[in-house]
Every structure is written in C-alpha cells, then in structure tokens.
C-alpha cells in the first residue's frame, strides 16, 4: 500500500527559530508522523534571523528560479533546504530578498508588525504550493501552522481547485494563541483580487485582523486542530459553529498519535463521500 503523504507548512520550526507552541509542534509532528509510516515534507519561511551557516542551509537550484507576482510586482522565489539530523527530516525554506532578508520574523525591533506581512503570507503560501508542484510530490494532507499560513486553505480551495496536482488533497489548519495586533493593509482585498480571487471568495477579508483571517481558514479547510492550550474565544466559538471536523488540544509530547489518527479520519471521511 502506498504511503500517505503529509505536507507541513509552518511559520516557525525549531531548531531554526526559538521554541514556541508553533515551532515546537511543527518540529515534533513531522518526525512522529514520518516514524508512524507516512511520507512528509516540511516548509517554512527563510527569515533573515536564521543562521544559514550554523544550520547548513543551501539553495536547491532545480527548485529555484520561479517568479511570483504579488500586487503586480515580480518576486523571485528561492528555495533552500536544511536537515534536522536527529529527526532525519529535511526542511525546505521559502526565500526572497524583498520579504525575508530583514533580520526579524514578523515584527520589527520595536515590536511593530511589518506592514507587508499580508504580502509575505501570500508569497509564502503560493511559494510552497508551486514548489511542491515542481517537486512532483502530491500531498494527501496539508497541515498549516500559524497565521502566516492561514491563506493557504483559500489558495488550495479556490485558485488551485482545478489543478490536478492537488485534486484529492485535503487541508488541516492549526489555530494557535500566537497573533498579531495590527490589521493588514487596507489594500489587501484588492491584492487578492489581482491574484485571481473573485469577490465571493474573499468577501470576508475586506478588513483583516487576526480573528477574521483565522475564521476564514477555519471555514475553508477540511479539519481544524487546536494548537495552543488556550485560543481566542471568538475562534473557539467559530470552530464549534462551523461544523468543520475538529481535534482538541494535545501537548507537544502527546500530539503525534491523535493528529495522525485525525489525518486518517479526514482522508477516510472524504473518500467515503
């Protein structure tokens, strides 16, 4: 029987960034899921604060070279890779000088959210999907971690819905406590329309804050996982009312088995349908 394939997309993964709910879980899960018999790939942004020499990042020439247009501007897509030796997994990095060269992740030295976090999220999500296509690797499940990945369900279900590469792919989104306090660019809605979305697809995203963005992901994906012990009350209520299959919180140490079973449930349910 062919192994099921799981694509992990995370805004943080240890040891490349410091431990957090997102980074630690996105490090633990791929290893555990792989050891459980599934095939995995993992992606994150190549933030400028990641030490490339220490972690031995190197460019994957055969995957680099594409350009993605975000808000009518061409941005080169560079793909790098590094190994987590003790876990026997590789992590692919989405890189671009305009978006990820700065020596920080999502906030500046004063703790202010970067003004272009919306475009960085767009570039990251699309960059992963295009790279996976170029790899020729078809995932059965995509599991997204962190708000920087929240647009990926929308891309998969709307812009890539007729792409044969993702024809049977299901998507799971983990909701974390990690948030942002500054609404995204007021032109974000127009940027999405330029990307190819129609107004019905993105009507809920005219004024994007953390809760609005996550509600969209919750209602677009095939399964939701609670990634932090406590999450926003509005999002808890949204999960309950959405009817989307839901997995409650499990700690980093205990999450592998229930998440693996949740993947099988999502795939199984949708095969039966």
Image: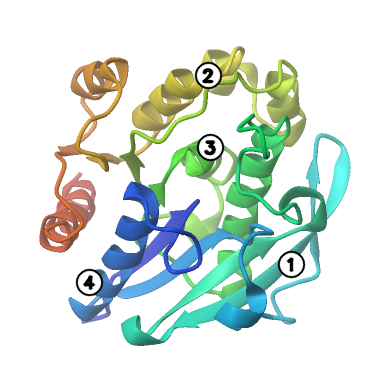
Residue tagged 3: 151
User: Could you tell me which quadrant the N terminus lies in?
Assistant: bottom left
Measuring 70% from the left and 54% from the top, which residue is drawn there?
103
Using the numbered discs, state the Cα–Cα distance from disc 3 to disc 2 in whole angstroms: 13 Å
In the image, residue 242 lies at what x, y percent?
Answer: 26, 21
What residue does disc 4 label? 32
Residue 63 can be seen, yes or no:
yes
Q: Which of marks 4 and 3 is in front?
A: 4
Which residue position holds label 2? 209
Q: Which label number is shown at residue 78? A: 1
Q: Position of residue 189 (x, y in %)?
A: 68, 20
The mark nearer the N terminus, 4 or 1, is 4
Q: How is the image coloured?
A: rainbow
Spatial CA span between label 4 and label 3: 26 Å
- Left or right relative to 85: residue 188: right
Q: Is residue 48 positioned above or below 82 on the image?
A: above
Say which label, 4 or 3, has the lower sequence index: 4
Q: Is residue 236 left or right of residue 155?
A: left
Say whether marks 4 and 1 touch (CB < 8 Å).
Answer: no
**SS of the residue under disc 3:** loop
Asked if the residues shown at circle 4 and circle 3 are in contact, with their CB atoms under 8 angstroms apart, the answer is no
């Amino acid at each position: 029987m062919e192994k099921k394939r799981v694509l992990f997309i995370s805004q943080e993964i240890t040891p490349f960034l410091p431990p957090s709910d997102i980074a630690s879980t996105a490090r633990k899960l791929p290893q555990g899921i792989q050891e459980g018999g599934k095939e995995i790939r993992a992606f994150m942004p190549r933030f400028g604060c990641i030490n490339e020499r220490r972690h031995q990042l190197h460019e994957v020439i055969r995957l680099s070279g594409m350009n993605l247009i975000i808000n009518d501007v061409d941005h080169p897509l560079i793909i790098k890779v590094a190994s987590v030796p003790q876990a026997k997994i590789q992590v692919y990095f989405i890189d671009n000088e305009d978006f990820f060269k700065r020596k920080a992740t999502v906030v500046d030295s004063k703790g202010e959210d970067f003004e272009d976090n919306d475009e960085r999220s767009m570039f990251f999500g699309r960059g992963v999907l295009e790279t996976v296509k170029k790899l020729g690797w078809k995932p059965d499940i995509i599991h997204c971690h962190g708000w920087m990945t929240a647009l990926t369900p929308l891309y998969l279900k709307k812009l890539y819905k007729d792409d044969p590469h993702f024809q049977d792919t299901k998507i799971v989104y983990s909701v974390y406590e990690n948030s942002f306090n500054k609404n995204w660019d007021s032109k974000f809605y127009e940027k999405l329309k330029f990307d190819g979305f129609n107004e019905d697809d993105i009507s809920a995203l005219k004024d994007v804050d953390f809760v609005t963005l996550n509600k969209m992901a919750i209602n677009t994906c095939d399964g939701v996982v609670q990634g932090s012990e406590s999450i926003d009350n509005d999002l808890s209520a949204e999960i309950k009312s959405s009817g989307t299959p839901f997995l409650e919180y499990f700690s980093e140490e205990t999450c592998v088995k229930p998440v693996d079973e949740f993947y099988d449930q999502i795939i199984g349910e949708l095969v039966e349908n």
